[in-house]
Amino acid sequence: MELSFNRVTRRFATPHATAHGVLHTRELIELSLTDTDGLVGYGEAAPLEPYDGVSVERTLAALEAYRPVFAAWRRSGSSALERCREADELPQALAAVDLALWDLAGKRAGRPVCELLSDTPAAAVAVCASIGAASPAQAARTAGAAVAAGYGCVKLKIGLADDALRVAAVRAAIGPQTALRLDANGAWSVPEAERMLDELGTHGLELIEEPVHGLAATRALRARVAWRIAIDETAAIPGALTARVADAVCLKISRCGGIAGLLAAASLVRASGAEVYLSSTYDGPIGIAAALHAAAALAPLPPCGLATLELFEPPPALLPVIGGEIAVPREPGLGVPGFG
């Protein structure tokens, strides 16, 4: 089996501001696995150093370590993935291999990946609109347009200046019926988060994602506020998935090491009594497609943060959001082309 990969850079339509910094471009690594019959499976590595501390260069080094595995390996895909894990256990690199193996498996079977994961996968996945740290007026315009397009949930990045004004403006723009989710990316201390949520909570929140960082801080804050709390970055901490510190856990294909790892993580979270939803790390079409297949198998889920392709310029024509949902690809494999 032949392994190849290359770097792909996508540009945000407008600078995307978060508590981790302002993103102008997004660099990804697309991967292909070609089997002895010439069938090609595609995967994607999506490290995001400001978010997960993993650089593109570190991920490329891990993928290079996998070359000998595929040059010599002739057994099952699952065994190949384990051999890669032994060579380098970096989740972001393993995710790219895992996705390509699932893509190959679906193409060999002539079925979409979601049908390999579940007997009754969902046909579409509800998604939330994602709004960066824009000005109050800009955030309100974007949120209002999202609701007009059929979104039932809006997620607003907070943890920066003018949070109170921006949250108020967005709530006024979306009306009382649309769910409002806030994402602070761990920007606050526990006292700061408690104080801010006392104010922002008056606008009605579906949940607050990663208001603080760490298990102890999340547990302490949850005991002090009435609003539902979700963990995202904190979910990467060992033991976090079963720690019972949050009402919901945001899972990501890249951080979980692929589809298989994400489904295992979801089982742990649900067994702990918390809710699961999926989100992207500004992935490309391959990563978003993989997340859609996983979400379809895990359905029903709250709205997932997978409507991020539209943040890029030009937005890919693949996987459009229609009425606040993205249809799960029905073609064999992941259902999206690779390398372009």
Image: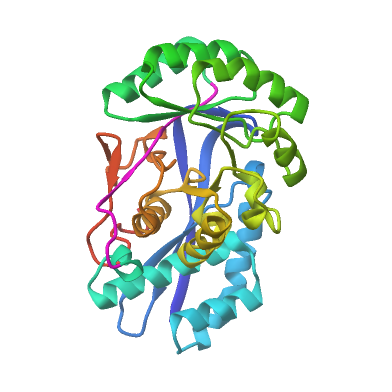
Give percent across and percent down for residue 166: 53, 14
Residues 96 and 25: in front is: 96
Name the residue rendered at 45%, 16% in the picture: 170
Q: How many marks?
A: 0
Residues 317 and 117: in front is: 117
- State which quarter of the image contains the N terminus: bottom left
User: Relative to residue 233, is residue 296 drawn left or right?
Assistant: left
**In the figure, 245 relative to 335: above or below?**
above
Give percent across and percent down for residue 243: 67, 53
Q: Which residues are magenta?
A: 119-133
Among the 4 quarters of the image, the one containing residue 326 = top left
Residues 176 and 45: in front is: 176
Is 131 magenta? The answer is: yes
**In the figure, 210 relative to 106: above or below?**
above
Instruction: Say whether residue 10 is visible.
Output: yes
Among the 4 quarters of the image, the one containing residue 248 = top right
Give percent across and percent down for residue 122: 28, 54
User: Relative to residue 317, is residue 130 drawn left or right?
Assistant: right
Name the residue rendered at 30%, 58% in the picture: 337
Instruction: Say whether residue 163 is visible.
Output: no
Is 147 magenta? The answer is: no
User: Relative to residue 227, is residue 101 drawn left or right?
Assistant: left
Principal secondary structure, stretch drawn in magenta: loop
Give percent across and percent down for residue 121: 29, 59
Q: How is the image coloured?
A: rainbow
